[in-house]
Amino acid sequence: MEHIHRIKYQSKLYELPYEVVYSRRKTCAVSISAEGKITLRLPLRTSDAQIRRLLLDKQHWIITHYLEAVKRAENRPVSDLTDAQRAALEKRYIEAAKDYFPKRAAYFVSLTGGAYKRVTIRDQKTRWGSCSAKGTLSFNWRLMLAPPAVLDYVVVHELCHLTHMNHSKAFWALVESVCPDYRTHRKWLKKHGQELIL
């Protein structure tokens, strides 16, 4: 069910639709997708009053990140490929990714430590990579459109989760030991990630 949150920002009233997802999680969280979709992830028994408080507390964060997403979408390059051409190109990039990512993972694992079981390639909308508790590394094929150093950063990031399944100081220290410029690459992805389209 879609809800509406009204925010007045810089003398303008915005009516922002948002979705609520309940689960067994213990904390409340707000996320905004690359397309500007707002999602509230909440514990099962979250009250309406708690939701209103969350929206109020996060109001500035919500509107600024929402407007950033809208601006990125407006500046996104328009492709002149036909659907058939795009599908064919995507297939080629996915096949290339299936060959390339395992090679990069095999190279960097000797530096990060840990052991993974397999590498999968996905077409995720908001995630560039993931590492499961069972040792499966997953990567977004669209990273093949990014600079090689940025792709390598994502590989290193997920490999480091084999040792630290969190984003603790120890995790980031391990990432930095292998990828000293990781902050630059992470910033590049945040700024240009939505440009990685065909």
Image (cartoon, rainbow, N blue to C red):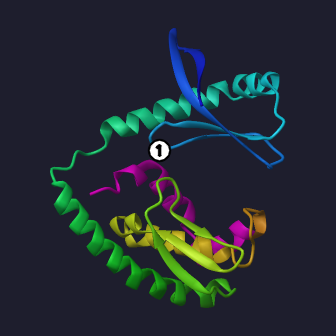
Lateral position of residue 193 relative to residue 131, left or right: left
Q: Quadrant of residue 140?
A: bottom left
* Neighbour tally class for label 1: few under 14, some 14-19, many 20 plus, Cα within 10 Å: some
Residue at 66% over, 72% down: 132
Residue sitting nearer the eye, 2 or 71: 2
Residue 56 in the image: above or below residue 70:
above
Q: Which residues are magenta?
A: 171-198
Q: Is residue 194 magenta?
A: yes
Magenta stretch: helix, strand or loop mostly? helix
Q: Quadrant of residue 31?
A: top right
Q: Is residue 182 magenta?
A: yes
Residue sitting nearer the eye, 187 or 72: 72
Residue 84, image x and y in percent? 18, 60
**Which residue is identified by label 1?**
34
Residue 55, image x and y in percent? 70, 26
Element class at badge 1: loop
Residue 36, image x and y in percent? 48, 36
Residue at 63% over, 85% down: 116
Residue at the top extreme? 11
